[in-house]
Amino acid sequence: MSAPIKHPENVDSFDGSEDVQRWLKRLRRSYRQVNGNQDVGPSDLIQAMDSVLSGEAAKFVEKSPLLRQVVDQADDFTATSDDLVLFENALRDGQKMEGNQR
């Protein structure tokens, strides 16, 4: 059985106003640093991302049945690497669409 993951003390929230790619890199790096330079599983990362979304980014996820399903799977610890990729890509695509509407 693997050791439980550790969570960084301070994780920046994401509301969609900053570059999502930079935020994702910081989030992943923070989790690797506190977990012995090891990546954490997809369910843990999706949960971490979802828990710090705010503003428009949180609304974007809430409005999407597919993304809500991915979050639900993560909450059940059944999310896959493909789910993580889908979630991250959706955040990127959502930010691009939001940027085009401004």
Image (cartoon, helix red, strand yellow):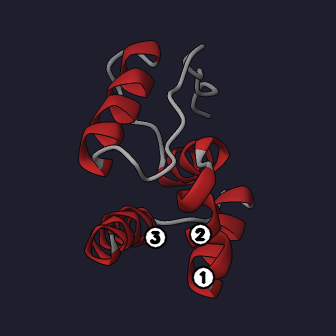
Q: Where is residue 27 in the image (x, y as percent from the top left)?
A: 40, 33
Would you say the residues marked 2 and 1 are in contact, meaning their CB atoms lie under 8 Å apart? Answer: yes
**Above or below: residue 73 compared with residue 28:** below
In the picture, the disc for residue 6 is: none
Q: Is residue 75 shown left or right of residue 86?
A: right
Q: Which image quarter: residue 76?
A: bottom right
Give the residue drawn at x 40%, y 48%: 17
Give the residue drawn at x 35%, y 27%: 38
**Above or below: residue 15 compared with residue 66:** above
Q: Where is residue 79 in the image (x, y as percent from the top left)?
A: 56, 65
Q: Mark 3 points at which residue?
A: 83
In terms of secondary structure, where does tag 3 sit?
helix
Q: Is residue 83 shown left or right of residue 28?
A: right
In the picture, the disc for residue 64 is: 1
Q: Distance between the residues labelled 2 and 1?
A: 5 Å
Mark 1 burial class by Cα count in 10 Å: few <14, some 14-19, many 20+: few
